Amino acid sequence: MTQARALTVLEGQHGRYHCVTRCVRQAWLCGIDPLTGVDHAPRKAMIEARILELGSIFAVGIYAYAVMSNHLHITLSIEPDAAKRWDDREVLERWVRLFPSSEPEQREAKIAALLASSIAVDIRRKRLMSVSWFMRCLDEYIARRANAEDDVKGRFWQGRFKCQLLDDERALAAAMAYVDLNPVRAGIADSVEGSDHTSVQARAAELRERPSNANKLLMPIVGYGVFLPSGDNSDGNLEPTGSRVPMTNAQYIELVDFTGRQLKPAKRGVIAANEPPVLQKLGITRDYWAGHVNGFRFAYCRFVGSVEAMTAKAKALNQRWLKGIGYARNLVTR
């Protein structure tokens, strides 16, 4: 049964989410259509670029994404503290990047008109820290571009995007790994490097170019997250805020590769079967981790977290249970 988005999305508050949106009738509108043979795969690069562009506009941190042939995944955090730091003009400059005017003079006139109303500025500030508006600006842009290319009208996306609230760092890390391993699970890639149009491939490419970043703390691929400048940043200090994943860039890539081997045990490679040290840092076992990641495929629904957190969320929603509580309880007893 369709449920109100407000039960999952905490508007105006910090939150971590896993979002999924699917093409209408799950048609391969972003890949090679198996029925007609028409190749829509070039759209994947356009979609990936749009995700990164929106990540630089909204008050979000993009932690993971995967663009598939008939759907896409995004793991992101909403960072309202970032939006609150923007002055009114920066809010509107970001807004007009979303809805640009054809002429520079019109752009400045639009900003000036909006600056005259504090209510108009406040509305747009709230929209720039909204997961619903983020997905709207992503889905609508892609649909218009794709329909124009095909010279058709009508729906491109199946309907409302699916959204899961991620309660803690374990859920965030598991969602990231689940998203980045989509091409491996689908059988169209057998390695991190071969997982095209995913954030883990972009992270691996960056480390090849800048090996010194391997031991730096894992940050969002674009946008806000672990650190924001404090005050006027005149002394260069950084103030921690937002979501944190307690691992380095190299540890995350190793963890994704390890997780892929658990999902496909026959796969051979140079990484040993023993669990990566970062799992100890997260306080979970290899079996729990593999089950937690796999749970995004079929077990979890609106909320992902520990048994205690899911039970508390169900109580807060005045429900007896949430889908996934039993699965999470079984993982703990393994």
Image: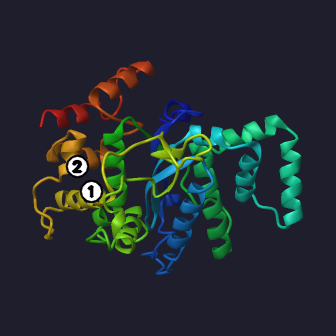
Report the side of 61 relative to 300 (left or right). right
Tell which of 304 and 116 is nearer to you: 116
Residue at x 32% of width, y 72% of height = 193
From what the image shows, is residue 91 above or below residue 193? Answer: above
Mark 1 highlights which residue? 251
Q: Which of the 4 image quadrants contains residue 206?
A: bottom left
Residue at x 36% of width, y 36% of height = 168
**Gap between marks 2 and 1 measured at Cα:** 7 Å
> Which one is earlier in the sequence, the residue at label 2 or at label 1?
1
Using the image, tell me which numbered label, if any, was put on residue 154.
Answer: none
Q: How many marks?
A: 2
Q: Which of the 4 image quadrants contains residue 306?
A: top left
Using the image, tell me which numbered label, if any, was put on residue 278.
Answer: 2
Q: Quadrant of the C terminus?
A: top left
Are discs 2 and 1 less than 8 Å apart at CB? yes
Residue at x 37% of width, y 56% of height = 179
Q: Position of residue 20 (x, y in %)?
A: 46, 52
| Amino acid at dot 2 | Val
Q: Residues within 10 Å of mark 1 (few under 14, many from 20)?
A: many
Q: Tag 1, which secondary structure?
A: helix
Report the side of 100 relative to 57 (left or right). right
| Amino acid at dot 1 | Gln
Q: Position of residue 76 (x, y in %)?
A: 47, 48
Residue at x 30% of width, y 72% of height = 189
Tell which of 220 and 285 is nearer to you: 220
Q: Position of residue 217 (x, y in %)?
A: 36, 52
Q: Residues within 10 Å of mark 2 (few under 14, many from 20)?
A: some
